Image: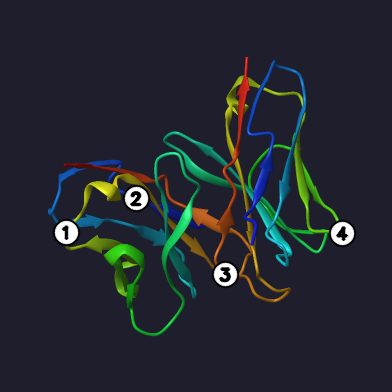
Amino acid sequence: AQSVSQHNHHVILSEAASLELGCNYSYGGTVNLFWYVQYPGQHLQLLLKYFSGDPLVKGIKGFEAEFIKSKFSFNLRKPSVQWSDTAEYFCAVTSGTYKYIFGTGTRLKVLA
Amino acid sequence: KAGVTQTPRYLIKTRGQQVTLSCSPISGHRSVSWYQQTPGQGLQFLFEYFSETQRNKGNFPGRFSGRQFSNSRSEMNVSTLELGDSALYLCASSARGPNLNTGELFFGEGSRLTVL
């Protein structure tokens, strides 16, 4: 069965620190990968997505993610976080079955 | 353009009761999917509908059911509620077509169910 693993459940950073959130999936075929973000009190929204092509994708608010097929990974990065990045981040994968598989989420707290 | 609307936003039920949650997708979106969100479990896929047909379902007991109407609005029902059903139930709509299984999900704010 497909699964998505997010290794960091809680991350605390100071403003201007660099961020990398890990995401690994288990599926051998063609996948589409996503990162969604849930800011406090708001609904989930798309941060970035990978379908094909350049494995380094850029999303909103300075976020980027790199798809490494050989490692089954799609890690999220941001060079310098801001207090407003405090949120919960979810990695998700979909592949030909009309359903998304989400990771358990990573709660990021950025200290001002 | 209005977003995904879920009702009710909050509800409290007791064990053994049943509950029906409603979701109105973004206008023009024909795909609606449902997820259960709990702390530590993330989002668990319940089912996905397209043009009134359930195309896939997750690993939930038969107490969880859903349907989609001709106007793409969707409902999910949970019968014989258990304490463990307490969760945030999220609906998402997508512009996915009949043969397209990818596409951005647009989420509603969810219905928070508490079972006592």
- Comparing B60 with B106, the one in front is B106
Q: Distance between the residues labelled 3 and 4?
A: 21 Å
Q: Distance between the residues labelled 2 and 3?
A: 22 Å
Q: Which of marks 1 and 2 is nearer the N terminus?
A: 2
Give the residue type at disc 2: Gln
Instruction: Name the residue at 44% across, 33% down.
Output: B39
- Disc 4 crowd, CA 10 A, few/some/many (<14, 14-19, 20+): few
- Disc 1 crowd, CA 10 A, few/some/many (<14, 14-19, 20+): few
Local SS, label 3: loop
Report the mark closest to the observer, 2 or 3: 3
Chain for mark 2? A
Can you identify the residue that label 1 sits on? A80
- Comparing A103 with A64, the one in front is A64
Local SS, label 1: loop
* Residue A82 to residue A79: above or below: above
Instruction: Name the residue at 70% across, 65% down.
Output: B29
